[in-house]
Amino acid sequence: MTPNTLFQHTDIILASSSPRRRELLAGMGVPFRIADAYPVEEVWPAGIAPQEVPSFLAALKSKAYPGTLTADQILITADTVVIHDGRVIGKPKNRDEAIDILHRLSGSAHEVVTGIVLRNDRTEKHLSETARVVFGSLSTSEIEYYVDCYRPYDKAGAYGIQEWIGYVGIERIEGSFYNVMGLPTRLLYAALTDFIRTQHL
Ligand SMILES: Cc1cn([C@H]2C[C@H](O)[C@@H](COP(=O)(O)OP(=O)(O)OP(=O)(O)O)O2)c(=O)[nH]c1=O
């Protein structure tokens, strides 16, 4: 099925303030409206595995949605983190932290995990996808140039793969480029299709 027929009876709501997620969902041909993301404190229980963190945070964002959902609606929330040396790296708080994160990522591999929650009045579906990103060696001047010009304070791992540093600094990626940017688009498209089919929307 193509997007024009698939989504015609469904009211899809993206609760996200991320411009990348809006761009990616639009690129998938999915008609949707945006709800303001209600800020949640991005903390998780100590015992949770790093890979499970994005799914946990996407569920928190879903629960924070203030409206009541109906059967023909699908609420989408998501979260992206970087995992390096077994540690979860979120958004940098300031310039020093951004520079420090990029020094750690330089010349090594890390994982980017995006978790998604789809929800309506009856059911909730959790998705998660991982990509592996390998950075070449970045010099201090390259890192400082990037942080000062691009101010990646709204990005997990202090970088945007779609920005200068992604073009010149990334050696290779295994997995979905769009997942690193904020949504695993192929997985999400299949899950939306399945959700609509099983919920008879
Ligand atoms: C690693 C990486 C992350 N990012 C972005 C995607 C996400 O917007 C952000 C991770 O932060 P998130 O907390 O996942 O999302 P957000 O706060 O931006 O938006 P929301 O309102 O949906 O909670 O980092 C890139 O744009 N490029 C990249 O290469």
Image (spheres, rainbow, N blue to C red):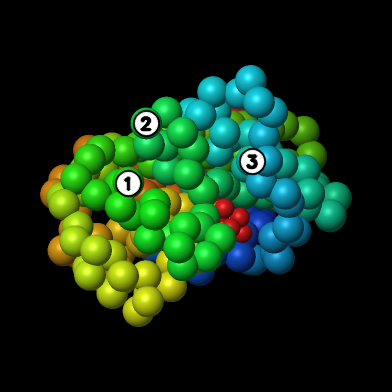
Tag 3 secondary structure: helix
> What residue is shown at x 47% (from left), y 58% (from top)?
97
Which residue is under mark 1? 104
Q: Residues within 10 Å of mark 3 (few under 14, many from 20)?
A: many
**Dot label at residue 57:** 3
> What residue is shown at x 42% (from left), y 43% (from top)?
82
Q: Is mark 3 within 8 Å of ligand 1?
A: yes
> What residue is shown at x 38% (from left), y 60% (from top)?
99
51 vs 177: above or below? above
Q: Three-letter amino acid code at disc 2? A: Asp
Q: Is mark 1 within 8 Å of ligand 1?
A: no
Q: Three-letter amino acid code at disc 1? A: Arg
The answer to whether mark 2 and mark 1 are in CB contact below 8 A is: yes
29 vs 173: above or below? below
Pick whichever of labels 3 and 1 is earlier in the sequence: 3
Give the position of the C terminus as an image quadrant: top right
